[in-house]
Each structure stands twice: as C-alpha cells, then as structure tokens.
Image (cartoon, coloured by chain):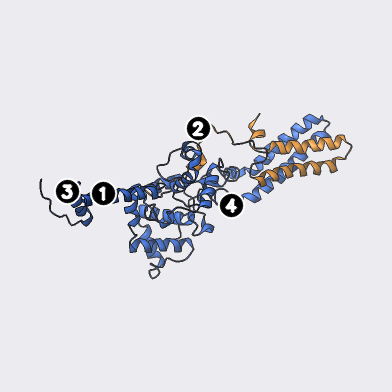
Amino acid sequence: MPAVLRTEIYAIAAAAGSLVIVIAVALGLSTPVAAPLGALVAIGLRLMRCASGGRLLARGRARRSKQTPRRWHYRVMPVGT
Amino acid sequence: MLATAPSGNVARDADETERSAPRATREGRARQARREAGRRAARRRHTGCRLRGSRALRARRTAPSAAERRRSADVVALCRGRRPSSSAREPARARRQRICAGDEQRVARLHAELVEHVLRGVARGALRLGLGRHRARRYRKARSLASTRRDPHLARPPRHARVRVLRLARRGAPRARHRWLLRPGARRGHRRRCAARRAPRRDTARRAHRLALCRGLRGRCALRVRVRDAGHPHRAAIRVLDAFGLGLFAAAGTTKSLDLGMGGIAAVALGVLTAVVAASRATCSRGSCRRSCAPRSTPSRPRPARL
C-alpha cells in the first residue's frame, strides 16, 4: 500500500469525494449537483482527520523504522543533576 | 593506635568516638541497633528517591540558602510574567547584562529553572518554552536549582496522582504536540522499559512514583507535557484551507474527466491525482510545509526567558 494512502487521510479523502461524484453522475444527478457533494465529502473526511488528531483509521501504534528518531527524546530536562 | 586530633566536624568526631568505643558493651550495642533502625527507616522512606539511605536524609536536611531562595522566587515571578522582586530596582538593561553577559551556563540554568517551574504547574499557560537539541546539551550540563535533593515537592504524591502517572506512562506513544521529558542520563527506551517490563505488577504504585521522580516532575500533570509552539502558529487555519483545497481540486478533476468522456475509475484516479498534487503543492509552497504539515518532526523554536 503506498504511503500516500497509509500515512494521512489525504488521497483517501480525495478518492472518496471523486467516487461520490462518479456515483452521483451514474445515478442521474447533474454535474453541478454532484460536484459539491463530492467536494463536501472530501472536505469532511479531511477535517475529521484533522479534528481527531490522526486517530482516524489508525490501527495501533505506528511502526517506526530504526533510523527514525523518537520524538520524545529530543528534549532533555536538567533535573536533579 | 594513633590518637587523632579533633577535626572540628562534630558529626565526624562523634562517629569516630563511637567507632572507637568497645562494641561489646550494652550501650554500644543499643546505639548500634538504633543507628541501624534509623538507616532502615530512611531506606524505607526513600525507596523511590534517587538518593538512598543516609545520603537521602542528609540531602533532605540541606535547606536552600537565602540567595537560592531569592533566585527561585525570581524564577517564579518570571514564570508569572512579573518582574523579579530581587532585581526590581536595577534597570532592565543592566539586569539583562548581568544575567546574559558571557555567562551562558547561568542563563541556561535560569532557563532550566524556569522550564522546571513551568512544568511544575506554577504557570501552565506560559508553557511555550521550546528546548531545541542545541540548547538541551547546555541544559544537560547546567545544574538545576530546584533539584531532587532540595525540593520539598518530591515527597510521595497522593495515591490517585500515582495512578494517574502510571496510566499516562502506560498509554503508549505520545501524540502530536506532546513530548516526553527525560532527565539527563536517561537512555533511549528508558521509559518503555520502566513502564512495561521491569517491575512486577504488584509494585505499580512505587514504580509510578519512581517514574515521576525519574523525570523530576510530580504526580498529576507530570509525565506528558503539552508543548504549544511545536509547529506553525496558524496551523489550524492552514489545515482547514488545505481540506477545502483538496475537496475542490478533487471535484474539479473528477468532473473534468467525466466531461471529457472518461470512465468512472479513470475519473476517480484523475480526481485523486489532481487533488493530491495540486493541493499539496498549494499548501507546501514557499517552504511552509516543513512547519505546517509535519509539526512533530520540527523541533520547536527556542524561546528565551523574559529577563
């Protein structure tokens, strides 16, 4: 699975919106009606992802490669030295 | 046996007198037993502390000096956005020079104290202090004023606080805008080892307390700390506009493909391609994506204390 579909809900939102437009056109709706529907679906999905802070469609803990540093080691606090 | 002259240190002299006394006497044995009991009690009391036994007791008895107390009060005042009381009379420029001129170590210490006080909940709203890696190295060397040895706040936290800490520690990887703070000497994987593997289940309260002490922080708000300036200041607005751009580009690409007589799958693919390429290019132009799209990968900007 490509990373653009896995890491962020970006391409998935776009695909869902496009799919809604295609289905709506196939069902007989006119293009000026179907296009805003699809756009709304894509925008909604993307905003839901932003609001949920990345938890949408996330399964468990993200895998990290060995080369990737862990973020919480960036800060070191001088306590009790 | 050579007679030793009194060194002036009362405690050491008493210790040596006691050592030279015959142990076989009843009084000597009782004294020895009392000392042992005291040591055991101290060890029990300070199990979670970094320092053990009599060293911990001695450290706890050491009170901060007047100058240290004054400086601590200054830091608290700085945290609350007030002027430090001890240097209220001197002009701001002189104060800045006094604190900053050529004394990076001291500034680092001051900053570290500030961060520490902020983290302790003195001023949670002011938690905008970012420590980059280059500063962290300095801070690692700097000695903190409110250290584990002197801070009365490091008494055992109440039970619910310990549980809270434990839950936080077990909760898994931190999300965006949350960072784990490690004290110097802590290695990679330290947190995970502490939280997950090392101690048995029944030892949970003590382990949680040790974790809290490990970070020099206390109970409730201790382990996970929100860092507010990690990322673009307008990242919420950028995300909303990005979402709108994505939707509009997807709709435009799909409708255009359908108008041109392409099939459904091809139209969807073209819509996705248009949306992803165009919207990401629009958002990430002029290098803004480095801060808006990946706030976690960007160390936040260091912000000096208001001196």
Alpha carbons under labels 2 and 3: distance apart: 60 Å
Q: Which mark is nearer the camera, 3 or 4?
A: 3
Chain A shown in which color?
Answer: orange
Q: Which mark is nearer the camera, 3 or 1?
A: 1
| Mark 3 secondary-structure assignment | helix
Alpha carbons under labels 3 and 1: distance apart: 13 Å
Alpha carbons under labels 2 and 4: distance apart: 29 Å
The residue at the far left in this view is B2
Tell me the kind of residue under disc 3: Ser
**Which residue occupies 74% across, 31% down?**
B269
| Mark 1 secondary-structure assignment | helix
Residue highlighted by disc 2: A67
Alpha carbons under labels 2 and 1: distance apart: 56 Å
Residue highlighted by disc 1: B32
Chain B shown in which color?
Answer: blue
First of labels 1, 4 by sequence position: 1
Alpha carbons under labels 1 and 4: distance apart: 64 Å
